């Protein structure tokens, strides 16, 4: 026998829907990756020489570009956490700044650039202020007698204000697709796995309930004396506490051995309270968290708390040292008896 209660069926469908949404988001992420590949192919066809971007293009940064190198210097600047570095290069007409991987620099330095220029590809980037400062200091420190010092005002005339980032494989437009694709991929994986896990847990739990118990639970849920608290997804029937929120679980009141509150504060103000129970299977569960913004919400919390307390006269109540110590021993005893 399966549950026919509308709220339980809605919860079960929600887990399936969560998995379906996750799969749809995964498909969208792959679509974005496909668009990034197409954008990259388009950028490769429209690639420009770096000097052309500096002189003519309105949208300078983020475009794919290339250079024909006839001279390359030693590295003049690098970050602490990488072997990538900044270098001066020349195409015979102008000086440029490039940012290269160590492997690419080693490859270029083995070539005879005076015989055949080396073509490198990358993405045009604005030169950051800290790099400009280092360039100016380094350039002026190596001036020969009679050469004019490089100033911040003259920097653009020397280097154009852009450098070629060889470490970037994609243009800005393609990167946008990739970044959103990665975010959707992560979200899709999380939702899909969460949906699968919850469906399996629900299926496993439902198998443990026999036909008579399911029938009793459904009858009590339909009883006019039962209460359903929509804001926390909780049923209180004559014999059962039924949780339908982040989990689906049915507890008999006599299975609940200990119950205590957990209060949440923000800036010294109590904002919500949680009800936690310890059951005869040695498991601890948070069955409800209720915000305390209104009088009605406080009344709902008290009503749930008092109902559970009244249904089980043997229930231990409160997170006291006495109860903590007592249930440490209970846990040991229950585990030893398994």
Image (cartoon, grey):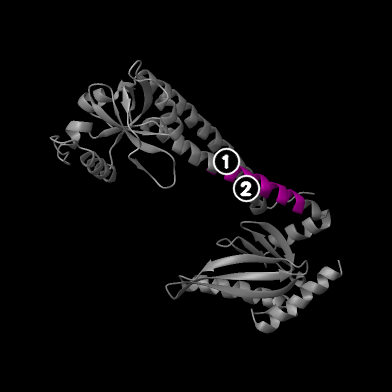
Q: Badge 1: how crowded within 10 Å, few (<14), some, or many (20+)?
A: many
Q: Which residues are magenta?
A: 187-205
Q: Position of residue 139 (x, y in %)?
A: 23, 39
Residue 191 falls within the magenta-colored stretch: yes
Q: Which mark is residue 289?
A: none
Q: Secondary structure at mark 2?
A: helix
Residue holding disc 2: 194
- Eyeballing the image, is 206 above or below 34? below
Quarter residue 186 falls in: top right
Labelled pair 2, 1 in contact (Cβ < 8 Å): yes
Residue 113 is left or right of residue 206, and the answer is: left
Residue 140 is left or right of residue 123, and the answer is: left
Say whether residue 165 is visible. Answer: yes
Residue 301 is left or right of residue 198, and the answer is: left
Which secondary structure type mostly characterizes the magenta part of the structure?
helix
Q: Mark 2 or mark 1: name the one nearer the start of the chain.
A: 1
Residue drawn at x 42%, y 24% as measured from the top left: 110
Residue holding disc 1: 22
Residue 34 falls within the magenta-colored stretch: no
Say whether residue 227 is visible. Answer: no
Farthest residue toward the right?
A: 337
Quadrant (top left/top right/bottom left/bottom right) for the C terminus: bottom right
Frontmost residue, 35 versus 73: 73
Q: Position of residue 10 (x, y in %)?
A: 63, 49
């Amino acid at each position: 026998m399966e549950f026919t209660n509308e709220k339980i069926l809605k919860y079960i469908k929600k887990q399936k829907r969560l998995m379906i949404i996750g799969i749809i988001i995964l498909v969208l992420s792959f679509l974005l990756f496909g668009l990034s590949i197409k954008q990259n192919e388009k950028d490769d066809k429209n690639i420009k020489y770096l000097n052309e971007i500096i002189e003519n293009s309105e949208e300078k940064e983020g475009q794919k570009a290339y250079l024909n190198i006839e001279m390359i210097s030693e590295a003049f600047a690098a970050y602490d956490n990488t072997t990538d570095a900044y270098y001066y290069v020349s195409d015979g007409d102008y000086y440029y700044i490039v940012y290269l991987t160590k492997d690419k620099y080693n490859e270029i330095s083995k070539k005879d650039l005076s015989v055949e220029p080396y073509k490198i590809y990358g993405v045009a980037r604005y030169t950051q202020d800290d790099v400009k400062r280092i360039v100016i200091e380094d350039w002026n420190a190596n001036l020969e007698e009679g050469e004019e010092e490089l100033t911040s005002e003259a920097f653009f005339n020397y280097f154009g204000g852009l450098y070629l980032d060889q470490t970037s494989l994609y243009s800005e437009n393609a990167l946008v697709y990739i970044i959103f694709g990665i975010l959707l991929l992560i979200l899709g994986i999380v939702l899909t796995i969460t949906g699968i896990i919850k469906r399996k847990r629900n299926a496993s739990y439902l198998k443990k309930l026999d036909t008579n118990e399911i029938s009793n639970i459904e009858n009590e849920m339909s009883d006019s004396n039962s209460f359903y608290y929509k804001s926390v997804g909780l049923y209180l029937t004559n014999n059962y506490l039924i949780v339908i929120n982040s989990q689906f679980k049915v507890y008999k009141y006599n299975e609940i051995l200990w119950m205590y509150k957990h209060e949440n504060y923000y800036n010294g103000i109590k904002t919500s309270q949680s009800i936690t129970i310890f059951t005869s299977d040695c498991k601890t569960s948070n069955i409800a968290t209720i915000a305390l913004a209104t009088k009605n919400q406080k009344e709902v919390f008290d009503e749930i708390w008092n109902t559970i307390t009244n249904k089980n006269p043997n229930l231990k109540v409160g997170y006291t040292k006495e109860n903590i110590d007592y249930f440490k021993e209970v846990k040991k005893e229950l585990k030893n008896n398994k």
